[in-house]
Amino acid sequence: MRTPLLCLLLLACGPKHAPLPPVTTANGALVPQLGHHGLVRAVALSPDGKRLATGRQDGRLELWEAQTGDLIADLLPAGPGIMLVTFSPDSKTLAALTDATITLFDVASGTELRHFPTGAPDMYDVWGATFSPDGTQLAIGTNVVSVFDVATGDSAW
């Protein structure tokens, strides 16, 4: 199952309007392709391997079933142009970062948990994001490193 998942990731990031040829595995099985029609800037696979999140330049955030490529949810973060997506270590929370906002989602329900400002002055200043091992903090890299409390959105330091 590793080969189809890798192909899903590669296809999600393909050119904006280029037709995608059928992709098959070594045994000839067709690989599911994600139904994107816009520029994908962010891709994350959940730590449990069950979900794939994709964030597009137009602000669409989509959650996919990793093994089948089926769309599970079309989520709307608080801001345009998703730059990064990342899952919490337990795969229960998804963070989407735009130029000025971090939006946290409950993966099971697709509901927004909260959103708060990144502190980045420009959309291209968001470079990285990761959850702490226990999932209680979210660190982001902009022109500085900031750490946020996931439960409140407050700056942790």
Image (tube, helix red, strand yellow):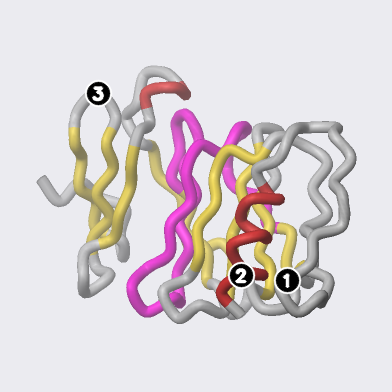
- Mark 3 vs mark 2: which is more N-terminal? 2
Residue most toward the top? 122
Q: In this image, 98 relative to 154: left or right? A: right
Q: Is residue 152 above or below residue 96?
A: below
Residue contact between numbered discs 1 and 2, judged by CB atoms under 8 Å? yes
Provide the residue designation for mark 3: 143
Q: Are marks 3 and 2 in contact (CB under 8 Å)?
A: no
Please rate how many residues cluster around mark 2, counting C-alpha atoms within 10 Å: few if below 14, some from 14 to 19, many from 20: few
Q: Which residue is mark 2?
A: 3
Observer-side mark, 3 or 2, equals 2
Q: In 3D space, how far apart are the residues under numbered discs 3 and 1 (Cα atoms)?
A: 42 Å
Give percent across and percent down for residue 27: 75, 79
Measure how far apart labels 3 and 2 are at the Cα level.
36 Å
Q: Could you tell me which secondary element the residue under label 2 belongs to? A: helix
Q: 82 or 33: nearer the eye? A: 33
Which mark is drawn over residue 10? Answer: none
Quick check: is 14 in the magenta stretch? no
Please give the residue where the numbered disc 1 appears in the rendered image. Answer: 25
> How far across and how far down the image is residue 96, in percent?
50, 49
Q: Which residues are magenta?
A: 75-102
Badge 1 or badge 2: first in the primary sequence = 2
Vertical side of 35 occupied by 48: above or below: below
Mark 3 against mark 1, which lies toward the viewer? 1
21 on left or right of 111: right
Q: Secondary structure at mark 1?
A: loop
Helix, strand or loop at label 3? It is loop
Q: Residue at x 38, y 31 (%)?
A: 126
